[in-house]
Amino acid sequence: MKKFFITLFTVATLTVHAQQQTPWQGKFEQLDTQLPTPNSYRSASGAPGPQYWQQKADYVILAELNDDNQSITGSETITYHNNSPDVLKYLWLQLDQNILAKGNLTRQTFTSSMRDTLSTKSLSQRVLDFDGGHKIKSIKDASGKPLNYTINYTMMRVDLIQPLKKGEKVSFTIDWTFNVGDRMKDGQRSGYEYFPEDNNYLYTIAQWFPRMCVYDDYLGWQNKQFLGQGEFALAFGDYKVKLTVPADHLVAATGALMNASSVLSKDQLDRYEKAKSTFDKPVLIATQAEATEREKTKSKGKKTWEFHADNVRDFAFASSRKFIWDAQAVKLGEKTPLAMSFYPKEGNPLWEQESTKAVKNCLEIYSKYTIDYPYPVAQSINTASIGMEYPMICFNGGRPNKDGVTDPQTWSSTVAVIIHEVGHNYFPMIINNDERQWTWMDEGINSFVQYRTEVERYENFPHWWGTGKSIAPFMIGDKSIQRPVMTNSEQVVAFGSEQYAKVATSMSILRETVMGPELFDKAFKEYAQRWAFKHPNPADFFRTMEDASAVDLDWYWRGWFYSTDHVDFELANVKWFQVKTEQTNLEKKSVTAKKGDLSTNASKSNTDFSAGPQEFTMINTPDNNYGEFKSRIDDKAVRQKLEGKNIYEITLKNKGGLVMPVIIEWTFKDGSKEIEKIPVEVWRTNEREVKKVFVKEKEVINVAIDPNQDTAEAELSDNNFPKKPVDSKFDQLKKN
C-alpha cells in the first residue's frame, strides 16, 4: 500500500505542477456566488418561490388625438394593488415621453464630436428644439384631493396621503397632454409619419401615458431613468381605454375592440366577423380603394374607439385614415386569436402578401416553444422607420419601391422584422423581464425564437443571426467595443451584435451543439411556463435551464454571458501511431529502442501524414504498478484489438479563451467522413491546451476542427491537419 500511495502522490504532484504552468481562469467554476441568493420569492431551481409576489396596476384611460396640431390630451385613473409585504408611502411612475422634453437627460449626456463633413441629419439631432414632454395638469386621489408629486426627468414620484399597506389598493387620477413628435426626425419609438403626397398622417403611439414603475422583490422600485436605449419595466394590469380620433381614421390597439358596430361600416363589420373564422388566408376588412378615398375626403367629425385588455403590461395604438386592414384567424390550443395587419397603400403589395402570414407563422412557432398565445389579437402595423413592440401590437418598417417592386433584401428584412416584433409578445410582454436592466433577456432570446421561426417556415431564409458563422467575425473583432452580455443596457456599445445576435446565436448553439434539441426545448419551455405573466431575472433563466435539463451550464453562462472571450481553437499537431507487429520482450527486459519506437519517433513534428505512422511498442502492464491491487487488464486482448488500427494523438490549443465542445471532422483515405463531438469538460483541468488520443479503423488523411463553425469558431485557418495554405491579404483582396 505504501508504494501505491507514493505513486498517487507523485502523479498528483505532477498534475498540480502542470496546472500551475497554465494560467487558470476558473471557467468551470460554479456560478452560484455571482447569482442572487435563493429565497422564498425565487427558488434555487429558477422557479418562482412559494411566497413570490408582484404588484398590479389597472388603468382606465380617456384620450383624444388631435390631427390638426399633432397632440394628445388624456386623463387616466390608476388603481394600484400593493401585493408586496412592504408599506409604501409613495409611488413611482414613468414619464418616458419626457425623453423629448426640453433639457432632457438623454440630450445632456449624449456625447458628440465635430468633423470636417457632417450630415444634416446628424446636425439636426443636435439643434432639435421640439418639446414633446408630458405636461402634467393635475394628480388627484379618489376623493378629488390633489396629491403632491415630483418630476425627476423621466420619473415622477407621487406622495400618498396615507401609506399603502400590504393587500391594500389605491386609486388616483392624472390629467396630462403632450405634443406628438415626428418619428422620421427624432428617431423615437412613438410619433407620427407625415405623407406629403396626400397630406395625411400615420400615428404609432406608445409610452404615451404616465405608467407605473415596477416594484419587486429584486430591486424594490425600478426607477432607472429612460435614456433611450434600455427599454421598459412594467407591471401587469387590466386596461379600459377610449380613444377619440378623426371619424375616418381606423384604429389598431392593444386589446379587444369593444364597440366594432359603432366605429366600422356595415361592410367592414361583416368582413371583420368573417375573418374570425377564416383560417386559410387573410380577409380584407378595409380595402386599398376605401383607404384611398378616405385620404381624399378627410372627415372633420370624431369617433371614439373602445378597447379592453386584461393582464397586459402596457397599451399602445396606431391611428390613420390611410390604413388598409386585413385579418386571419389562427388556431392555437383552445384559443383562436386574430392575426391582423394595418398598412398604408405605400406598403402594398408587399404587406398584403406577407404581413399577416408572418404574424400567423410567428404565433404558431412561438407557441410551440413557449405557451399558446393567450391574447385575442396580434397586430402588425407598417411604418417607415424602426420596429417596436407592445402587447398585441407592433410597429414594423419595410416597404416596396414606389413602382411596387420588392427586392429580395427588402422582402426578407420585412418578414424578419415582423416576426421579431410580433415575437416580442412573448418576450417581454408575457415573460416579463426588465428591459431597462437586461436587454438580452427579451431581445436576444426573442431573436433566437425568431431564428427558429425563419428556419421552420421560410426555406433558405437569409438569417440576420442564429448561426456560429454569422457571429464569429464580431466575437473575434474589436474587443474595445465589446461588453459582456451581462451589462446594463445603457452601457452596451455594440448593441445589436451583442444583445441580439450574440445571444440569439448562443441559444442556437446551446440547443444544437451543447444540450441537443430535446433537452433544450423542454428546459426552454419550462422557463416560459414558469415565468409567463411574471417578472424573471437572469438567474431565474440560468437556473431553470439547468434545473429542467440536468445539464451543468455554469461554464456556458460564464463564457458567453460574463466575458468577451471568443471561440478560437488551434489544431496544433496530429501524430499518427500504429502498434509494432514484431515480437517484443513483453516483460520489458533488455528492450532496446529501435526505429519506429515511441521513444525515438514520437517527438518528430509531422506537417502531414505522408511520412506514414509512427510505431510504438506495447508492453504488458507490470503488476507491481499497483502493489496489492493486481491488474485485471488482459494485455493480449488489448494488443489484438489495437493491432492494425490507426491511433491519432491530437493537440488542441484554446486561443480565444471560450471553452466549448470540440467538433472533429475526420476524413478517411477512402473518402468517407466522420463527425465526432468531444464534450466541453475535456478542458476542465487545462483551459488552454489539451491532448487526446483516438483509435480509428481506417487511415485518416485530414482532420478538421469545427469546419462548419457550429460552435462559432472564429479562425478556421489553423483548424486543419495537414495545414492548408492561407491566402495572403493581397490574395484576398484580388478575390474580392
Image (spheres, grey):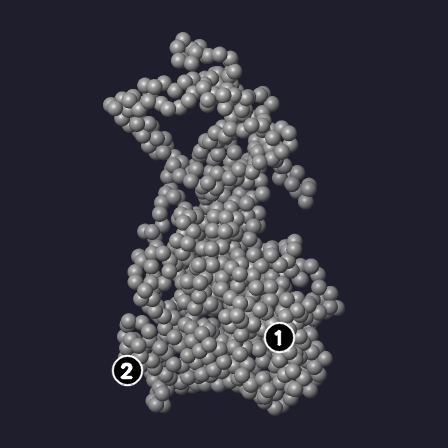
Q: Residue 301 at what x, y percent from top left?
A: 61, 91
Task: Determine whether the residue tagged by mark 2 lies in a helix, strand or loop.
Answer: strand
Identify residue for label 1. 277
Q: Is residue 123 visible?
A: no
Does residue 534 appear to the left or right of 178 in the view shown? left
User: Which is more toward the observer, 636 or 677?
Assistant: 636
Task: Determine whether the residue tagged by mark 1 lies in a helix, strand or loop.
Answer: loop
Q: Residue 683 at what x, y percent from top left?
A: 42, 38
Q: Quadrant of the C terminus?
A: top right
Q: Amino acid at mark 2?
A: Gln
Q: Amino acid at mark 1?
A: Ser
Which residue: 34% across, 19% down?
Answer: 623
Which residue: 37% across, 78% down?
Answer: 80
Q: Residues within 10 Å of mark 1 (few under 14, many from 20)?
A: some
Identify residue for label 2. 162
Location of residue 6 with respect to 200 vertically, above or below: above
Q: Quadrant of the N terminus?
A: top left
Q: Is residue 251 visible?
A: yes
Q: Residue 312 at what x, y percent from top left?
A: 46, 73
* CA separation in Å, label 1 and label 2: 51 Å
